[in-house]
């Protein structure tokens, strides 16, 4: 199926997509705040500019959009047009995510990735369930992990996704 927009309109639409203070980030901030956890946002001094830094727990949290970070879930669908362009762009994001996780781990930080599908879509977690997973990971000093609709899972630094 061809794109319904011209290249110029599509480019304008894509440029308008925000990278800060997204709905997902606001929701995670609210859940962390309700838990009484102190955090700072978008710390540019750390690799990957984590969305949330919980310094007292030596932990960082990234909120990843399933499309932009190639999560294997129903929210990821490769566009039918300009497929090569999109694959190159998204694969570069995945490679950068891996490098950032590795660099943060080498600096002694624990990394949590919260996937968009955990917050929206048919299989999303309730706020209560998501908050429990966040608290469990932060307070239990868990290893690098990710949260998706299936719950919380370990992720390694030796694979890109």
Image (cartoon, rainbow, N blue to C red):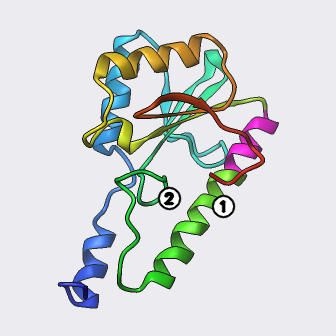
Q: Which residue is mark 1?
A: 95
Q: Residue 1 vs residue 149: left or right?
A: left
Pointer 1 and pointer 2: residues touching (CB < 8 Å)? no
* Residue 90 percent coordinates (x, y): 52, 67
Q: Which residues are magenta?
A: 100-107
Q: Residue 6 magenta-drawn?
A: no
On-image quarter of the N terminus: bottom left
- Camera-side residue of 31 and 15: 31
Placement of 93 over or under 128, stated as above or below: below
Residue 38 shows in the view: no
Image quadrant where residue 102 sits: top right
* Residue 130 percent coordinates (x, y): 38, 23
* Residue 123 percent coordinates (x, y): 30, 37
- In the rendered image, the residue lying farthest to the right is 106
Q: Which residue is mark 2?
A: 70
Q: Residue 27 vs residue 161: left or right?
A: left
Q: Residue 103 magenta-drawn?
A: yes
Q: Residue at x 46, y 14 (%)?
A: 37
Q: Residue at x 28, y 66 (%)?
A: 16
Helix, strand or loop at mark 2: loop
- Camera-side residue of 46 and 7: 7
């Amino acid at each position: 199926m061809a794109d319904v927009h011209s290249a110029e309109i599509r480019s304008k639409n894509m440029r308008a997509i925000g990278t800060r203070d997204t709905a997902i980030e606001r929701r995670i901030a609210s859940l962390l705040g309700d838990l009484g956890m102190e955090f700072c946002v978008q710390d540019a001094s750390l690799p990957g500019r984590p969305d949330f830094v919980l310094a007292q727990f030596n932990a960082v949290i990234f909120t990843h959009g399933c499309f932009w970070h190639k999560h294997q879930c129903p929210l990821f669908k490769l566009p039918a047009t300009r497929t090569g362009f999109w694959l190159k762009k998204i694969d570069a994001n995945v490679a950068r995510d891996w490098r950032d996780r590795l660099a943060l781990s080498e600096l002694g930080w624990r990394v949590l990735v919260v996937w968009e599908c955990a917050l929206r879509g048919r299989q999303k977690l309730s706020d209560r369930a998501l908050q429990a997973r966040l608290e469990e990971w932060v307070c239990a000093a868990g290893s690098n992990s990710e949260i998706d609709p299936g719950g919380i899972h370990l992720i390694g630094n030796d694979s890109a996704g």
